[in-house]
Amino acid sequence: MSVACRRTAPLHALTVRFLRAVACCLGLLLAGAAGALVPPATLDAGVHELDLRPHLTVLEDPGQVLQLADVLNGDAAGQFAPLGDRTASFGYSDSAWWLRASVANTSDHRRDLVLRQSYVLLDYFDLYLVDRGRVLRHWTTGDTLPYSTRPIPHRDYLFPITLEPGQELSIYLRARSEGPVNVALGLYGTQALVPVLGAEQLAMGALFGSFVLLALCTALLYAFVRDEAFAYYLFYVLCYGGYMAVFNGIAQQYLWAETPALWGVAQVVLLMLALHFLLLFSRSLLRAKGRSRWLDRSFLALQVLIFVLMLASPFVDYGTLVQPITFTVATTVFMVVAIGITGLRAGQAAAGYFLVAWSVFLVGVLLYLAKSLGLLPHTWLTQYGFQIGTIFEFVLLSVALGIRVKEIRQQSRTDSLTGLANRSRYDELVEHAFAQARAAGTSLGLLVIDVDHFKQVNDAHGHAVGDRVLEGVAESLRRHLPAQAVASRYGGEEFVVLVPRTDDAALMALAEDLRRAVAASSPGIPVTASIGFASTAGRAFSDPRGLFRAADEALYAAKRTGRNRVVGWNEALPPHPALAAAMSPETP
């Protein structure tokens, strides 16, 4: 029995080896058959544009060791698999990727064609044209190589191909990159490609033209308003526009065609600067500084990370920085959205537009990320969607900046302590109201209000208490003034109120109401006010200054006669010397 077993064992081993060999051969044959099932792309006389992706087979080379001879005649030749329903987006990968397609000219005349790879951010790119095992042309190019390595000078990769009648060529492409590997191969007749490239150039011109126009408008606005949010936004637009020029291959074409080493550095530096100014702009626009301790700390930590990545970019290869950059971008997006939400909760009008702008932009970014990770195919929408989102983002952010301009204008007209109109705004209002009353033949009344003994309040209780007193007076005015009246802080403890279409009796009643309201506005500290008023009813003032001097004279009459009272101006009051020049008798 033991002898039989010893004789059977070698036979069993040989059988297992034989079956393994057969399985291996079948696997190779099936792989080769699968590759053979992918039909060649056929070009007849009526075909002038062709997407090659349905005709591609793909082979991953994890060790980056395969050469053309290996994929032509070696074992690897039978390992190509149809791309099928997969996208030609392989995401971030350390592998080299081989792609193969066959193109046949079924027409009866020669075809001069252009092969286009429209995704430009490939580090290394080899393209081989093979005719029945013989290499006709070989190009080596990529964004890490000089621009002169491209056979046709263009931001995309364009390769001239000539097919004789009945000729079939095999196209082999080898791509590897430290960023996402996306393949978007199309075959065009020379006449068909021109309008396609022209339309895309027009779109690029619109994109970068909008950057330039937006930068100029923002610079002009900053020159007028001198608000730091506009300066940050200007630098954000410039840096992001520069990053887009790198992303779309325009910078490589026009700025550093023969110095490709600048590409990786410029990409990181411009992106990080754009994030830096975006954070500063967001915090300034929505006044987020000091609103949240964790936001402030996260903001500072993120700024440190941004500058570390910028400083590292000349010395560390891009592949090593990809993950930290991705983390920084994602964190910045989270931070900006958080700033927008806090601004919305604080009731800031610009925050709503800010969040909508970022939502539109993020939709485009998510499409691009899904394409970069191989979840979506490389299409015009997935490639340029976030650039379209950028335009909408900038438009909506410009609306938010417009709200900021309105706020700045309002602040320039508003007293910061009381919230009433300030002196300069009063000067505008009284000129307009005086002219309107004169033109309409109606009257205009003016009250001048002064808080009694305000200096003693400040000296005895401090300026903080004095500020609260002024705020209380302003609140009393807001509550008791009629809708058509406008109150302003004239300066110090003095307030003025414009009342259109009124007379002395109505002004006296209103002034008494205000005097009592002021006395009740600060129960902890005795506060009173003296009020003088004047109106144009039955009188002719040559200008608004004359009306003010009359009311001011009445105010000082109230102070001379004991304070905490209301006095209306009349001719019996001793006139101010300057008042007489501003007055003229009423003509019947």
Image: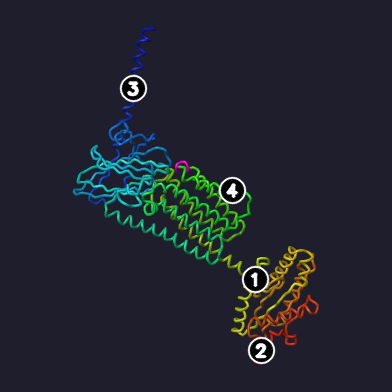
Disc 4: which residue: 298
| Frontmost residue, 2 versus 61 | 61
Disc nearer the start of the sequence (2/4): 4
What residue do we see at 63% from left, 54% from top?
291
Disc nearer the start of the sequence (3/4): 3
Disc 2: which residue: 584
Q: Eyeballing the image, is 32 above or below 7? A: below
What residue do we see at 20% from left, 44% from top?
166
Q: Amino acid at mark 2?
A: Ser
Structure colour scheme: rainbow
Residue 41 lies in the magenta-colored region: no
SS of the residue under disc 2: strand
Disc 3: which residue: 19
Closer to viewer: mark 1 or mark 3:
1
Q: Amino acid at mark 3?
A: Leu
- In this picture, residue 568 sits left or right of residue 229: right
Disc nearer the start of the sequence (1/3): 3
Q: Eyeballing the image, is 490 above or below 89? A: below
Q: Which residues are magenta?
A: 317-322
- In this picture, residue 482 sits left or right of residue 155: right
Q: Which mark is residue 422?
A: 1
- Residue 513 in percent (x, y) is at 74, 74
Quarter of the image holding residue 103?
top left
Disc nearer the start of the sequence (2/3): 3
For the N terminus, which image quadrant?
top left
Disc nearer the start of the sequence (4/1): 4
Closer to viewer: mark 3 or mark 4:
4
Whether tag 4 and tag 1 are in contact, CB under 8 A, the answer is no
